[in-house]
Each structure stands twice: as structure tokens, then as C-alpha cells.
Amino acid sequence: MNYSLSKIMHLDELLFDNRFIHELPGDPEVSNNRRQVIGACYSHVSPAKVVKPKLIAYSREVADQLDLALEACESDYFAEVFTGNRLSAGMEPYAACYGGHQFGNWAGQLGDGRAINLGEVLNRQGQRLVLQLKGAGPTPYSRTADGLAVLRSSVREFLCSEAMHHLGVPTTRALSLTLTGECVIRDMFYNGNPKAEPGAVVCRVAPSFTRFGSFQIFTARGDIKLLKKLADYTIRTDFPHLGEPSPTVYLAWFEEICRKTAEMIVHWQRVGFVHGVMNTDNMSILGLTIDYGPYGWLENYDPDWTPNTTDASMRRYRFGNQPQIAFWNLTQLANAIYPLIEDAELLQQALNLYAESFEKGWEDMMAGKLGLSVFDNSLTAELLIILQLVETDMTIFYRKLATMDIDNRTPNDISDEVLIMPLMEAYYVPEQLTSEYKERIGHWLRNYMRRMQKDETPDQERRMRMNAVNPKYVLRNYMAQLAIDKAEQGDYSMIDELLKLLRHPYDEQVDKEVFAVKRPDWARQRAGCSMLSCSS
């Protein structure tokens, strides 16, 4: 059979059921003006029309999940629909209402300020997938903003959504990246220097975009009836295996959210991802990484690093604090759903389940990164201290550690200089490698060798085990910025090049070695290559 003939050739053939807006109460007001939306889970809103839609990239994997033929994705109609100019058959656009804690403070109503959901598709495997445009214009929840997005942030979101999926990290996905043909004014660092930038739209895809804040808003307003409606809908739609909603099922539902969140955070710590804005409105009830704003990847291993300029002083959302912030956010969700369960002790036990799940998952993850059969606390703790003593690239360090020859070698017969040689590419400033440092890491490497020899794990098996969980390629900020620089000049080739690279982050890809090196010195302080603001 011709592969393309088994696929959907035109967007009008997609099957929408739009259950969210059909089963939950909506905003009766139809005007698209900024306002407090009371007693509703969403507001009907249409995307803004733009001058010249242009598709510049799409994900074949996400298209495949939607049963879309490549011809459908490369059509003018596709560009029109996923920039917001047209609606295909079955689409019923809306923006969701939710609240949230931002940087630890309750912010009240937030909502989809620059996201517009087009509807919910049912694919041929029976999966439900929400299509959402980011940057397609204002909604009632836009507050003082314009609801638009610029090319630089859209490139980052498109690439990272797909990169995270291929890394094995739970995430929302990205179907397409389009240009609007219009300019958007942004003050990138909020320092009084606004400028016009190319406007763009990303189509995001997920089974659900429901957030912790989706429940918080109704409890904060005392609307327990609507809280229950949303919880019941969520359980029946996204957690049907738990059974019909009841106090017992509400608790089981929260426990599953705790476990899924723990799993997600373990993956973040494994690959060195820093979200940057872990507000409760940016936390998915499905345990998916959601809302790619000022994210970043640990290059120099620094647990105190945050990519968010807004968080530069507090460092609330720094890499090393992400597990604790997830727990804090889950506690806010527990407070929100308390009226459904009315048992603080049971909710606390569920929160403890997060801590237990994270600790167990983290230990298993760290054992995997080191190629160990079981977790070794002293070996791991010492390594995490050593990694901070000098500027050490986390991604490169673990990949190079896997290359060490351990079989049939006597640790005490090897000098510090020889032991450290395979790791040299991971160091940003070789001059920092003092004799004291070399002695300390040499001691650790000998202990590591002895442990691997005790495990009787052959080098080949250890390398396969380590390389399966330690990526060779991640979306370093400078790489994304290079793609943005080219795209802003009308050259979109690097977006496609990175998309292809990041499909196989654990493979060697010998022709792509240029992307497996340390961040270059020119990128250390350059805007977009280190820290970023929430501006888009």
C-alpha cells in the first residue's frame, strides 16, 4: 500500500470531538476583551488574522501521530490553519481559564493569554490530542499583553518540545512553526529597548493542557461546584483507568499526578534541563514538560544556575531546586483539591509519595548515568561535589566517562594525569585543574573503576548502558540562537538541521560532532545563549 494513501491528505478530514468545551461550562460573553472570567472553564475566541502565513518547519513525528500525510503538512491550507487565518472542519477555538502561583505568590486569574486551543483530535489509535496555537493573538486572559509571539521564542519552543521527546522526557509536542508576515514589538530584557521582531506561531500538541492552576482558580474563588466538574471531567477523560470519580478516586488521581511529576523531574535532572519558570500554571496534571519559555541546559555543572533573568536574584527555579519546587507546587494543588477529599492526612501521604518516588527514581537514574548495577551513595555524592569544583560540562563529562577503559586495569597503577585524560574535553578552563583537583578526581576515578570491576560489568556493556541515558546532543542555548540568527535573516535551514540532529540525541552521528562540544566562549554572555527573560 502507498504510505501516503493511508494517511489524511487534507486537514478537513481530521476528526474533532472537542469534549472539553462540550462538557464543561464556558464563558457566556463572546467579546474578546480582557476581563475576569467567572464561573467558566474557558472562553470562545478566534485566532487573529495575519498578513502572510508561511510554514518554516514541522515535525514529521507529530504529523504521523495525527495521521497526517506529508502532503497535507506542506500545503498552503496547512500554513493558513496553523497560523490562525482559517479553521479546518471541526475546529472550535477557545482559551482556557486558570490561575496560579508565580514565583511563590498567588497571582489570581492567569489563563491562556497567548494560547488558543483549536480543538481536540481523535487519531486512528483512539488517542485524544489537543491542538493549540501559541502566539495567535489576544484572548480575554491576555491582561496587558498582545497575545503574540516572536520568531526567537517560537524557534526555541518548537525545537525544545521535539528535542525533549526524543530524549525520553515527558513533554508536550510541537507540530509546526509558522511566520505571520508581521512584526511584533518586544523589549527582550525589559530594559527600555523595545524593537520590532518577526512574528511567529507554534502549534503545540498534547493529550491535555490542563494545569495545576486550572483547579486552583476555582478553589480560590470558592467555586467548589466547578472545581468538582473539572476534576470529574479530567479523571474521566485523562485518567479513565482510575474509575468513576469519588473521594477515593480523587485521592488515587492525586497520587498519580505526584508520581508522574516525580518521573518528569527525574528526567529533567538526568539530562540537565532547567525549566526556568516552574509556576503552578506551568505544571501539567499529566506530568508533561509544558510552556518552554526561558529554559536552558546545564553546561557548566552548577546546581544554582537558572536561565531566567527574572529569577536571577532569588534563583527560586534553579536546577538544584527543581525537585523541591515540584513538591511545593504539588502542595498547592493538594490545597486546591482538598474540598473534594477533605482529609489532610491522606493528601499529605500522597505528597510523601512524590518524595519517595523522586528519591527512588533519582537514585536509579544516577546509577544509570554511571553505569552501575545499583545506586552508590558515597560515589555519587562525591562526584556531584567534584563536578562543581571547576567548570565542567555535564553532558560531555558523562559521555566521556563512558569511554574509560576499565577492564583488566589496576587502578593504583594509573597516574592522575592518565586517568583524567579521557575527560579533558569536558573542562571549560583547563587552567583550573590544579594538582589538588587532579588528585581528588583521580581518587574518585579509581574508586569508580574498583566499583565497576566489583560489579563485573564489561566495558562494552557499561558504555551501552551509560550512552542510553546520557545524551551526546542536547539543545544548548547557543545552538538555538544560531538557528534563530539565521532564521531572522530568512534562512531556516538550521532549524531543520537541529530537528534532525535532536531526533537521535544518544547516537554518535559522526558527521555532527560540531554540536557535541562545549559552549563556545563567544556564547558565554551573549543574549539568548546564557540567560533569557520571560519576554517573547
Image (cartoon, helix red, strand yellow):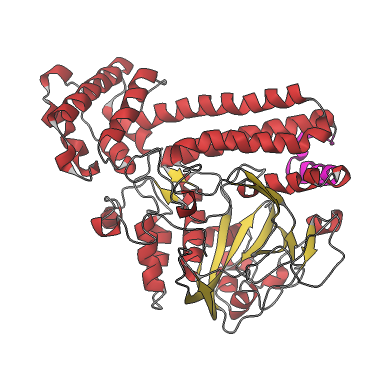
Compared to residue 256, the image places residue 120 above or below, namely below
Percent across and percent down for residue 156 are: 47, 60
In the image, residue 228 lies in the stretch drawn in magenta: yes
Q: Residue at x 63, y 68 (%)?
A: 147
Q: Residue at x 65, y 28 (%)?
A: 351
The chief SS type of the magenta part is helix
The image quadrant that residue 303 belongs to is: top left
521 sits to left or right of 196: left
Residue range corresponding to the magenta coloring: 227-245
Image quadrant holding the N terminus, namely: bottom right
Percent across and percent down for residue 181 are: 53, 81
Percent across and percent down for residue 69 are: 59, 67
Q: Residue at x 37, y 53 (%)?
A: 476
In the image, residue 145 lies in the stretch drawn in magenta: no
Q: Is residue 463 visible?
A: yes
- Between residue 370 and residue 190, name the one nearer to us: 190
- Between residue 483 and residue 437, name the one nearer to us: 437
431 sits to left or right of 329: left
